[in-house]
Image (cartoon, coloured by chain):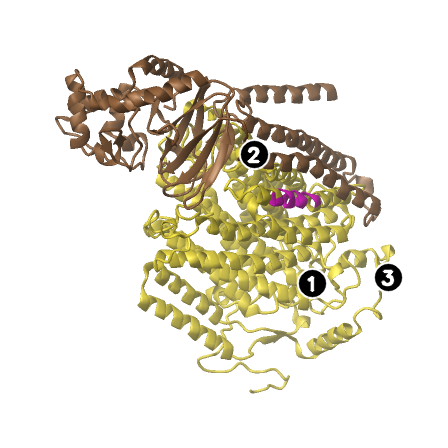
Chain colours: A brown, B yellow
């Protein structure tokens, strides 16, 4: 019986473990050293926790069963024990020993994760800034500013300078690293590294008002060569808008971008300098829109432009067309064409591939 | 002052006449009887508890399935803010206070608390704060920045409405009530114990009450200051927390959590005290290792002030601070573990009766163990970086606050209901209530561990359906409704058995402490004669003289002067009757003044503020000069039930 029970318990744990490993924001399915170190500590405490719980719950269950009042007990009193010094001293010391077992690796890991100087190692600096409700990612050494998608090379340490422009946010990519808060007037930092190629989900973890649930992002980890190519091509993207497009729809969209006021809030390098909303310089290369909530398809972008509040309630993007505006469809089509033209030609293929990957696990 | 033939002061006449209604609304509004005030705390606490519970169920409905739009994000944010604030300040704290009020004087052999009118003031001020806070729902929207209210989100720039003002002012008023009540109980426990009841003979519940009063007195001032600064920032545009003007948002977190962590122990220690009374009674054994359990409670309370930054492991306080706070937090697991082992030691070799209060107490041990263990997991700062602000924390805190605090309070409720009302709660219904709550609670909150570890953050009003959280969220919602149903069964149990429950004698459980030596419900004066305490668990040893005294003490050696005083009091009472303090309108009046003043602060109304201030000052003045009053009751003329 007890073996059967143990197997059942083990079976449940294994099944739960497999389920937990398969989830897109699982803290168990780690791809980088930070999340890995954190998971190691978690597993240590987890097994000790199971042990302690089985011990306590077992003793509790046994005591209740073994010492339940029986009818013949009605008159006699049980032994009136007041305590037992040896027992009490030993169950004070036992948890202390367990805590030392947990405490030593805890302290070691705290200092390892707070280390900021790495010799003989290339470190990429990124300024990650939280806004209600999107993320700005700036690579000061590469001259790149993008939003909501953090591109990183695999196997390379990324040093994130975490800042906030408004309220407190928290940067969290569960498969890569535990969270760190972005606090106004405070310079926080975090290093991350991914050893695997992939698109990893991130999400703001500190409550930041209305659209907190929709303040998501992606970390896109690629082999270093691909990352370098991406960084290089980013320059092409930023120069793309200056070229006159052969597509009249794109030209119309480009005009509308200024007419409808988009330029007041959004930066498109070389064309507009708005700082309220996310940079759109490379929007055509992005896999998602709305801070990681929708795949960046033409339909979704059109729906977003039509009524951003319906897709992400509370966000600061205004609704630009009245419901009965006869020009709405045409203008939205042109804007979508323009925004999707903001890409490097070389990366269209990659974008298609990302879309395919993404469709399977889309937020909506 | 006129003295009548029995040497009793006649009440003064005129404006400052003390009210004397014994029944009806006025008697409740003016009562200073700790037992009546305790009952008022129970009533108000349970009403707010239901409100907080409904808020929770609404959230669970919204989260039952992914991407639902039943509740919009702004309303959702108000719901979780009010749920947290309500459950902490308006449900668990006042329900604990209800037990303190009703029981502490009875357990220490006293006829009331040290300051009966202040006690009434605490209750009415608590109620005023609670009503003010909840009135925000109807006055432009409830607060929506979380029960923790992190700056700069609470500043006027990001929260221009009045919701945060209601929160800041409401909590400030509640803080006044808590502080006054804490001082009152501190003085009561230190000074009003019956002769012979040394500190180490106090019931464990009273010990934990004592520790909690210290925690309140030392922790609430930090919140008072923080709320005052927030209020200044919002009202007079100061810059304590405004980053644009160089303010420090992180300061709020330090101030809030140096209050907030002791607050956690303010919520759990009373429950620990309750089950430390229930377990011995239903095991028919003394508490195992009483001195160590007392010391553990004191140590937990003390360490509560040294761990606040573990709520801030991810805020970038640095490796040194994280190391320090990780280690201090771990230290708390030691006294907590000691308590659990001592409770097990109490059960061991006992004659265990599985009554409803005992079931809740045993449920407490099991559930609190889970909550305690996940607490140790949080103390591991690097691992906590993955858990902070996720549903793992939601699971942890509910295991501590429902599986811990609430189960403890329910245990106490079933245990002392006969003492409070004179009626027994039917056991069969009680067991249904327990098993429904126990299973519903675990179904609702256990899956949250998994949700948190697979990346679900707290305080999100919806989530994508591809993130893997659908099943557990649905399960959690189902569990929440089972839990709510269990609580309904509990209310049914209470309402039915208040009317038709069988009468409880003085001591229906074969219990151990002083309150079981007097009638149920207790007479207005509690003890016809001030008892003399020779043991821990005095009632138990009176019932079992064959056990002898546990301590080598006798009447001659302990507290000679106390004994003489008690004898004097008792002989005076026999000839003159027992003096009971007079009722008073003024505590209620001061609270009304604070209530009006609160709205004035929220709406920046000077005339209203002056009016409130006038009511406060006028009531305090009248309070100070209303004279002795009171009445004398003669116990030999039959029991005087106060309610």
* Residue that appears at 54% across and 41% down: B313
Quadrant hosting residue B100:
bottom right
- Indicate left or right for B452 with B464 as reference: right
Tell which subunit mark 3 falls on: B
In this rendering, do the residues under marks 2 and 3 share a single chain?
no
Q: Quadrant of the N terminus of chain B?
A: bottom right
What secondary structure is the magenta-colored segment mainly?
Answer: helix
* Residue that appears at 38% across and 68% down: B612
The circle drawn on residue B108 is 1
- Distance of mark 2 from mark 1, alpha carbons? 53 Å
x, y percentage for residue B569?
A: 71, 75
Tell which subunit mark 1 falls on: B
* Residue that appears at 64% across and 35% down: A108
Dot 2 lies on which element?
Answer: helix
- Distance of mark 2 from mark 3, alpha carbons? 58 Å
Mark nearest the camera among 2 and 3 is 2
Q: Outermost residue toward the front?
A: A120
The circle drawn on residue B552 is 3
Does the magenta portion include A205?
Answer: no
Mark nearest the camera among 3 and 1 is 3
Range shown magenta: B324-334
Quadrant hosting residue B65:
top left
The circle drawn on residue B610 is none
- Indicate left or right for A108 with B554 as reference: left
């Amino acid at each position: 019986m007890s073996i059967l029970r143990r197997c059942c318990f083990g079976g449940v744990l294994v099944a739960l473990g497999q389920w937990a490993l398969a989830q897109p924001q699982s803290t168990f399915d780690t791809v980088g050293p930070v999340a890995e170190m954190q998971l190691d500590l978690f597993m240590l405490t987890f097994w000790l926790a199971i042990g302690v719980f089985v011990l306590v719950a077992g003793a509790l269950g046994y005591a209740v069963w073994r010492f339940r009042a029986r009818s013949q007990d009605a008159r006699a009193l049980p032994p009136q024990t007041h305590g037992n010094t040896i027992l009490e001293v030993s169950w004070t010391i036992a948890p202390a020993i367990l805590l030392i077992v947990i405490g030593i690796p805890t302290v070691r890991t705290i200092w390892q994760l707070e280390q900021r100087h790495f010799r003989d190692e290339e470190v990429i600096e990124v300024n990650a800034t939280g806004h209600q409700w999107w993320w700005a990612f700036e690579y000061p050494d590469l001259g790149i500013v993008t939003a909501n998608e953090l591109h990183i090379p695999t196997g390379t340490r990324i040093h994130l300078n975490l800042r906030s422009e408004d309220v407190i946010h928290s940067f969290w990519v569960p498969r890569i690293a535990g969270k760190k808060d972005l606090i106004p007037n405070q310079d926080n930092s975090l290093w991350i590294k991914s050893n695997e190629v992939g698109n990893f989900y991130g999400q703001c973890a500190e409550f930041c008002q209305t659209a907190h649930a929709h303040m998501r992002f992606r970390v896109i980890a690629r082999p270093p060569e691909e990352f370098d190519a991406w960084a290089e091509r980013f320059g092409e993207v930023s120069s793309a808008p200056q070229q006159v497009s052969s597509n009249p729809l794109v030209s119309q969209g480009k005009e509308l971008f200024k007419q409808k006021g988009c330029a007041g809030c959004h930066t498109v390098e070389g064309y507009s300098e708005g700082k309220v909303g996310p940079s759109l310089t490379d929007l055509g290369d992005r896999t998602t829109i709305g801070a990681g909530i929708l795949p960046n398809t033409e339909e979704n972008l059109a729906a977003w432009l039509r009524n951003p509040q319906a897709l992400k309630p509370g966000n600061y993007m205004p609704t630009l067309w009245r419901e009965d505006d006869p020009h709405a469809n045409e203008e939205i089509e042109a804007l979508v064409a323009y925004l999707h033209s903001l890409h490097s030609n070389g990366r269209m293929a990659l974008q298609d591939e990302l879309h395919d990957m993404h469709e399977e696990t889309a937020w909506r | 002052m006129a003295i009548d033939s029995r040497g009793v002061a006649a009440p003064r006449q005129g404006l400052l006449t003390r009210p004397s209604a014994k029944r009806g609304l006025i008697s409740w509004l003016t009562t200073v009887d700790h037992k009546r005030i305790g009952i008022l705390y129970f009533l108000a606490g349970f009403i707010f508890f239901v409100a907080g519970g409904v808020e929770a169920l609404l959230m669970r409905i919204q989260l039952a399935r992914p991407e639902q739009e039943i509740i919009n994000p702004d309303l959702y944010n108000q719901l979780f803010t009010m749920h947290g604030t309500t459950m902490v300040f308006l449900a668990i704290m006042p329900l604990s206070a209800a037990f303190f009020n009703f029981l502490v004087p009875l357990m220490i052999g006293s006829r009331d608390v040290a300051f009966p009118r202040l006690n009434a003031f605490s209750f009415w001020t608590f109620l005023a704060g609670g009503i003010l806070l909840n009135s925000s729902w109807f006055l432009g929207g409830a607060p929506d920045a979380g029960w923790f209210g992190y700056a700069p989100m609470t500043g006027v720039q990001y929260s221009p409405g009045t919701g945060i003002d209601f929160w800041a002012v409401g909590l400030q008023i509640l803080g006044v009530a808590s502080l006054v009540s804490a001082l009152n109980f501190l003085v009561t426990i230190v000074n009003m114990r019956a002769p012979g009841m040394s500190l180490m003979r106090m019931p464990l519940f009273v010990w934990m009450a004592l520790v909690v009063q210290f925690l309140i007195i030392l922790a609430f001032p930090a919140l008072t200051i923080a709320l005052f600064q927030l209020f200044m920032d919002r009202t007079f545009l100061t810059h304590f927390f405004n980053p644009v003007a160089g303010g420090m948002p992180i300061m709020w977190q330090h101030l809030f959590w140096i209050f907030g962590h002791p607050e956690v122990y303010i919520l759990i220690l009373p429950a620990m005290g309750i089950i430390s009374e229930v377990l011995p009674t239903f095991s028919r054994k003394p508490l195992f290792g009483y001195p160590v359990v007392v010391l553990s409670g004191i140590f937990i309370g003390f360490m509560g002030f040294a761990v606040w930054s573990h709520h801030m492991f991810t805020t970038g306080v640095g490796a040194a601070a994280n190391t320090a706070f990780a280690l201090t937090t771990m230290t708390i697991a030691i006294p907590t573990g000691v308590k659990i082992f001592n409770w097990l030691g109490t059960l061991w070799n006992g004659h265990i009766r599985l009554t409803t209060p005992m079931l809740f107490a045993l449920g407490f041990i099991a559930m609190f163990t889970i909550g305690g263990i996940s607490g140790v997991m949080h103390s591991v700062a690097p691992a906590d970086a993955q858990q902070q602000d996720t549903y793992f924390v939601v699971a942890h805190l509910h295991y501590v606050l429902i599986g811990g605090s609430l189960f403890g309070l329910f245990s106490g409720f079933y245990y002392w209901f006969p003492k409070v009302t004179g009626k027994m709660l039917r056991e069969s219904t009680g067991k249904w209530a327990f098993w429904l709550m126990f299973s519903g609670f675990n179904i609702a909150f256990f899956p949250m561990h998994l949700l948190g570890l697979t990346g679900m953050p707290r305080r999100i009003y919806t989530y994508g359906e591809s993130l893997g959280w659908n099943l557990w969220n649905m399960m959690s919602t189902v569990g929440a409704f089972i839990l709510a149903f269990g609580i309904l069964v509990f209310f049914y149990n209470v309402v039915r058995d208040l009317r038709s429950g069988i009468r409880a004698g003085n001591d229906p459980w074969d219990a151990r402490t002083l309150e079981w030596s007097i009638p149920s419900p207790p007479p207005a004066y509690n003890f016809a004669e001030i008892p003399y305490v020779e043991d821990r668990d005095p009632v138990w040893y009176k019932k079992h003289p064959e056990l002898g005294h546990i301590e080598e003490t006798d009447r001659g050696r302990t507290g000679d002067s106390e004994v003489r005083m008690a004898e004097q009091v008792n002989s005076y009472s026999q000839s003159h009757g027992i003096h009971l303090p007079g009722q008073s309108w003024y505590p209620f009046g001061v609270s009304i003044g604070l209530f009006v003043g609160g709205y004035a602060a929220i709406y920046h109304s000077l005339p209203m503020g002056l009016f409130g201030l006038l009511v406060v000052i006028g009531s305090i003045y009248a309070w100070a000069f209303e004279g002795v009053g009171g009445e004398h009751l003669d116990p030999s003329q039959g029991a005087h039930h106060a309610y």
